[in-house]
Amino acid sequence: MAYDPANIFARILRGEAPCIKVCETEQSLAFMDVMPQTDGHVLVMPKEPAASIYDVSHAALAACMQTVKTVAAAVQAALQPDGLLIAQLNGEAAGQTVGHLHVHLIPRWSGVALRPHASAPADPAQLEALAQRIREALR
């Protein structure tokens, strides 16, 4: 998968498309998935343009994973799921739908099924409320 600078995540990074931010660092951005598989589904991506793990620099990947760990702890504190699925998909055959490297943080509750990947948009007000709870846990 070649990097397309017009992909939605690149547009978000340039401020050309909206997102519900959870946190931002110099090298990464965490935001709510607009088509979440569970409540509290957060995406974390490096700001470096890279389609997959094969394309990203070691420094950008390390910075992104630091944000993954920080946000994962905040998701746990804010939402208290029974578990947390962390996934990073590479290529269409693996299920990657946006050609910009990103990591999924998907809270899991026992007995609650995952919604299908990238299937239905969530209510923006609900996403903002969940993001606010996670942002508060980051403080």
Image (cartoon, grey):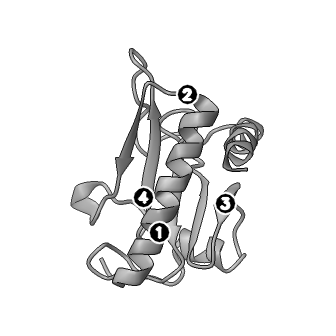
**Badge 2 amino acid:** Gln
Task: Estimate the x, y position of residue 103 in percent, counting from the top left.
Answer: 42, 58
SS at circle 1: helix
| Numbered tag placed on residue 103 in the rendering | 4
Q: Is residue 4 above or below residue 94?
A: below
**Badge 1 amino acid:** Cys
**Badge 4 amino acid:** Val
**Residue at 47% from the left image edge and 64% from the top image edge:** 66
| Numbered tag placed on residue 64 in the rendering | 1
Q: Is residue 87 above or below residue 29?
A: above
Q: Quadrant of residue 128?
A: top right
SS at circle 3: strand
Q: Residues within 10 Å of mark 2 (few under 14, many from 20)?
A: some
Q: Nearer the viewer, mark 2 or mark 4?
A: 2
Q: Residues within 10 Å of mark 4 (few under 14, many from 20)?
A: some
Dot 2 and dot 4 residues touching (CB under 8 Å) = no
**Badge 3 amino acid:** Cys
Task: Estimate the x, y position of residue 28 in percent, counting from the top left.
Answer: 56, 71
Dot 4 and dot 1 residues touching (CB under 8 Å) = yes
Residue holding disc 2: 80
Work out how far the residue at label 2 is from the one at label 4, CA to CA, in angstroms: 20 Å
- For the N terminus, the quadrant is bottom left
| Numbered tag placed on residue 23 in the rendering | 3
Does label 3 or label 2 sit earlier along the sequence?
Answer: 3
Whether residue 3 is visible: no
Q: Residues within 10 Å of mark 3 (few under 14, many from 20)?
A: some
Does label 2 or label 1 sit earlier along the sequence?
Answer: 1
